[in-house]
Image (tube, rainbow, N blue to C red):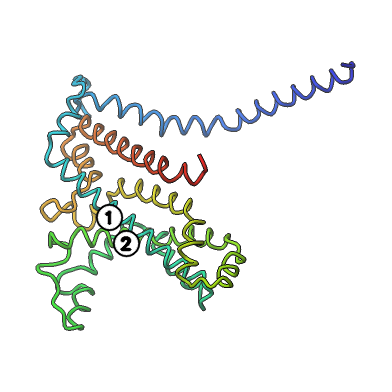
């Protein structure tokens, strides 16, 4: 190696080290903030999950897996898990299926596409609490728009009201969850649909394939990775549901809408059982993590060819 080549190699290494140092310096504030407000609270909640603490006492009592055992034996926690699973399945299946249908219709060239996209996306940027308050008034017994509409159609509203009826309360909350997330799913699906080459559909049409066959054999397989992404995001978002339920039903009637997030809030900030609340948080994390791994194992890895 000549002297000039060695000098160039040395300069190249020095430049790389300089680039790495500059990158580390630029990322340092973000890394510090992420560790301070995300990593540290996560690790500290894990520490609290094996402690008994009211949030005020200077002393914490170590109880090991006692908090997790109490959750396992708690009928209230099992009910909250059941309600959360029901809400998650309902919002995920209905939200993904309906948003795909709407996205396909919007992508088919109908008139006023931009207006429809705006209308469907408005709930996404609307404050969740404000939307929940509006929906609560819509479902208000007697004077709510839902009851007025049913009476105008000659139908009898459920008694005593939508959100006080154990058979209807969770269904209405699921409906609000689907409505709130629908616009986001539609935008993501539209991006995927517009990237499918039109030649595929033209060739299928020439071969005699109908609309349903083109949808089933071309659209669905090609947007499967997007569907997996939306399902995972919907499951995570649904398991963290709190504000909609808190505003609309506060867990009632008789616990039919008592989701895990609401129960965690009560344990932490009403009853001051920080250890139990932290254990709930870790149980939720474990469940969501396991579901995500299962989905990736059976669907994501196959789509990636692994």
Position of 272 relative to 243 (above/below): above
Q: Going 26% across and 26% down the picture, which residue do you hit? A: 48
Q: Is residue 8 rendered to the left or right of residue 215?
A: right
- Residue 267 image-quadrant placement: top left
Position of 30 relative to 137 (above/below): above
Q: Nearer the viewer, residue 2 or 173?
A: 2
Q: Is residue 73 rendered to the left or right of residue 216?
A: left
Q: Quadrant of the N terminus?
A: top right
Q: Going 32% across and 37% down the picture, which residue do you hit? A: 285
Position of 14 relative to 163 (above/below): above
Q: Position of residue 224 (x, y in %)?
A: 47, 53
Residue identifier under label 1:
244
Answer with mark 1 or mark 2, whichever residue precedes in sequence: 2
Q: How many marks?
A: 2
Residue identifier under label 2:
131
Alpha-carbon span between mark 1 and mark 2: 8 Å
**Neighbours of disc 1 within 10 Å: few (<14), some (14-19), many (20+):** many
Q: Nearer the viewer, residue 273 or 201?
A: 201
**Neighbours of disc 2 within 10 Å: few (<14), some (14-19), many (20+):** some
Q: Position of residue 18 (x, y in %)?
A: 70, 25
- For the residues labelled 1 and 2, say whether their Cβ atoms are less than 8 Å apart: yes
Q: Position of residue 249 (x, y in %)?
A: 19, 56
Q: Which mark is residue 44?
A: none
Q: Is residue 183 rendered to the left or right of residue 286?
A: right
Q: Going 39% across and 61% down the picture, which residue do you hit? A: 182
Q: Nearer the viewer, residue 305 or 3?
A: 305
Position of 221 relative to 267 (above/below): below
Q: Element type at marker 1?
A: helix
Q: Position of residue 237 (x, y in %)?
A: 35, 48
Q: Element type at marker 2?
A: helix
């Amino acid at each position: 190696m000549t002297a000039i080549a060695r000098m160039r190699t040395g300069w190249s290494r020095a430049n790389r080290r300089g680039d790495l140092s500059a990158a580390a310096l630029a990322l340092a504030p973000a890394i510090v903030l992420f560790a301070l407000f995300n990593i540290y609270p996560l690790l500290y909640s894990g520490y609290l999950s094996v402690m008994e603490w009211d949030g005020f006492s200077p002393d914490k009592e170590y109880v090991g897996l006692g908090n997790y055992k109490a959750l396992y034996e708690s009928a209230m926690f099992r009910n909250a898990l059941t309600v959360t699973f029901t809400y998650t399945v309902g919002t995920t299946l209905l939200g993904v299926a309906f948003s795909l249908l709407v996205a396909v219709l919007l992508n088919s060239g109908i008139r006023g596409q931009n207006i429809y996209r705006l209308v469907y996306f408005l709930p996404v940027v609307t404050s969740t609490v404000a939307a929940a308050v509006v929906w609560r008034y819509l479902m208000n017994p007697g004077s709510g728009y839902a009851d007025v509409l049913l009476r105008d159609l000659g139908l009898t509203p459920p008694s005593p009201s939508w959100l006080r009826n154990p058979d209807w309360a969770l269904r209405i909350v699921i409906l609000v969850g689907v409505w709130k997330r629908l616009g986001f799913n539609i935008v993501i699906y539209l991006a995927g649909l517009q990237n499918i080459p039109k030649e595929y559909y033209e060739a299928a049409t020439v071969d005699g394939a109908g609309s349903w066959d083109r949808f089933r054999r071309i659209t669905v397989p090609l947007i499967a990775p997007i569907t997996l992404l939306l399902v995972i995001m919907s499951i995570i978002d649904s398991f963290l549901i709190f504000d909609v339920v808190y505003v609309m039903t506060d867990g009632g009637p008789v616990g039919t809408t008592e989701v895990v997030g609401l129960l965690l809030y009560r344990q932490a900030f009403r009853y001051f059982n920080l250890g139990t609340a932290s254990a709930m948080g870790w149980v939720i994390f474990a469940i969501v993590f396991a579901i995500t791994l299962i989905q990736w194992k059976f669907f994501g890895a196959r789509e990636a060819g692994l």
